[in-house]
Image: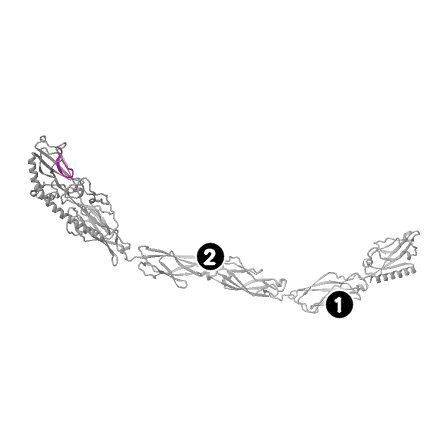
Amino acid sequence: MGERWCAAVLRVLVLQAAWALAGGQVRYSVAEEAKAGTVVGRLAQDLGLEAGEAEARRLRLVAQGRRASVEVSGASGALLVSSRLDREELCGKSAPCALRLEVLLERPLRVFHVELEVTDINDNAPIFPAARKNLSLSENSPPGFRFPLEGASDADIGANAQLSYSLSPSEYFSLDLQKSNERNIEPELVLTKPLDRETIPVHRLVLTASDGGRPSLSGTMELVISVLDTNDNAPQFNQSVYKVQMPESAAVGTLVTRVNATDADEGINSEVTFTVTNLIPPSGKDVISINPNTGEIHLTGSLDFEEVSIYDFRIEAKDKGTPPLSGHCKVVLEVLDVNDNAPEVRVTSLSVPVAEDASVGTVVALLSVSDRDSGENGRVRCWVWPASPFGLEATFAGSYSLVLREALDRERVSEYEVEVRAEDGGAPALRASRGLRVPVSDVNDNAPAFAQAVYTVLARENNAAGAELARLWARDPDEAGNGRVSYSVWEGGAGGGGWRAASSYVSVDAESGRLWALRPLDYEELQVLQFEVRAVDAGEPPLCGNATVQLFVLDENDNAPALLPPAGSAPEAGGVAAAEAAAAAGAGSESGTLWAWAAWGAPAGQVVAKIRAVDADSGYNAWLRYELWEPRGKGPFRVGLYSGEVSTARALDEADGPRQRLLIVVRDHGEPARSATATLSVSLVEAAEAAAAAAAGSSSSSAATNVWLVVAICAVSSLFLLAVVLYGASRWAPRAAVLSGPGPTTLVCASEVGSWSYSQRHSRSLCVADGAAKSDLMVFSPNFPPPPPGPTPKDTQPEPSALLDTVSGNTLLVSHP
């Protein structure tokens, strides 16, 4: 195709050159947009110049006012295209486009006129005034509505500038072409179908203009047709029902939800405001509010599931069109329960006090347990704390019975502080408690009980009438009348003086249990008094308990020693009984003269006489000692301290005289000590006379000794029988603890020096339980002569554990080890 174009150009140039030479003016033609260096014509040849002459004569173009697009080649003299030729720039819409050039030839100087025609090629496409055209049509515009459009322009000329128009396919618009003159065509846009902004708010079309060149060039313009809104659409919510769940613990100001309503219209027709209508329950107006512009619903009050669990209300969305249109939706706010209510424990019935003999299963109280929460938050479990004889039993939902599950004992626990605890199933769990005070009422189920089964009471003789001997106390753990104890003495036997009623010696205070003596006690009359004290409560029926009281009378030193006649004078003097009677009556503090014989030359240590004395008291009070009062110093005789034997202190001689008068004082060991005096007249004779006197005295002494032996055997037998009876009673009596009463402690023991003079030792064995007896108390009786001389065996003198001794009405009790 390029070769044919070049051949055509050459033909044109040749024709133009021939025409120019014929007419006297050189004319050339060249197509615009020819490349630089394209030969327009052989100017030197066409001017009739020889080869080489154009360069020699300096063939050149005269400069024009604007930049030339052609030049003359100095070597060949050809007219060449030197720069881009643009017909539209050189000539615009003028046709034809001819450039007039002046060619200067020097030597000689000649001027030639050359006309260069620039021919048009289709190098410019149609151009619209704007690449985009914005149009606005109301959506209620009727079909057939016309809208004139601006056409395109083409810088080319001729057929290259002949334009045709076309419109992109559209069901709403078409293109109508109107000829304004023979050359111009005006396009019009025609509406073929009603518009709906909500369906297609903007229509985008392309208007294309094509020229008549070959090949044809085209230009386009975008038509943007905006559909103007009318208020023909009501606001629409994106959902008809909004369901929201919120915990009741949500804070004030919390966003509940945001409703969204859209209006297909635009502008003011699409501006929507929100309001709340038809609120159920009406109290919800204090709980929620809506932002009229954004549709955000917030909490303005606190939620309470227990009061309102669901809020149901409607939202109206209204646009600002004329007339305004509105839409509606429903909002359901479900309040979720949180564990914000602790269980409640209420006592509906309380039956107190509870008798301690109440049977297991007795209902003490009725309780109601509730929780305002729901589900697990309202499911409550209950129990009793601390562990007690009471428990809970569920009767029906939310109701419980506090029942007795164990036997009660008021004496162990008189009152219970019961706490009923409740806990719900929430997370975290909430708790509540209710305290109950359950007192236990007393029944008479405990008999009075003494601290020990056997009381040993020691009382000194010669006490004052009304003196307190002991205080007995029986414990009854019951209360009020059931625990109020009264005491009484049950008759018992008195030992040592035949049977005597205990009530003739002692009495017990019914209220305090104070044991007191009705009259002074005399050890020589009464040594042991055993009786029972009974304690009875005031219950219904009354219960009782008892204790055995063993009252031992302690000897006082109220009897002075009494001298006995010598062994040989017993028949004449009336014997020992008379002497003891005299001693008991307080006589014998002074006696007549006793006679004894001693032989001249008797060696030292020979017994010449023996002073006999007896003391109606017992123990230390009856333990006698003998002292030589006169003569003092180194006399020929001495007296055994505990034996009373008068013996020679040295050998007797004539210097001692025919007679010795001895004054002997007999004292007991009491406090204060009592005494008696004996005068012994010792005659100093020859040995034969002394032997005859001794023989006479021995016969009478033998008879007296037999009498003493019979009396001693009877006394020992009686005491043995009494000891057996006491031992049996002690073994069968229950073991008891030992009471100790007020008063000083005095140990009573036997001396290992000497012997008991003119006294019979009696040992009473007291038993406190099954087992071996213990010789705890030593009671002495002055009714028999002393045992044979010699050291007293230790095993017959056991040491008492403790004797509590009181004088003038203080309590005397003995405790057993």
Secondary element under disc 2, as helix, strand or loop, is loop
Q: Identify whether 504 is placed above or below 659.
A: below
Task: Read off the residue under disc 1.
Answer: 177
Q: x and y percent of residue 45 in the render? A: 91, 57
Q: x and y percent of residue 248 in the render? A: 49, 59
In the image, is 497 to the left or to the right of 197? left
In the image, is 455 to the left or to the right of 786? right
Using the rendered image of the protein, determine whether residue 374 is visible from the camera's viewpoint: no
Instruction: Give the number of the disc on residue 428.
Output: 2
Using the rendered image of the protein, determine whether residue 274 is visible from the camera's viewpoint: yes
Instruction: Give the number of the disc on residue 236.
Output: none
Write the start and end of the magenta stretch as one range: 639-649
Q: Amino acid at mark 2?
A: Pro
Residue 643 colored in magenta in the image = yes
Q: Identify whether 563 is placed above or below 7.
A: above
Q: x and y percent of residue 416 in the render? A: 35, 56
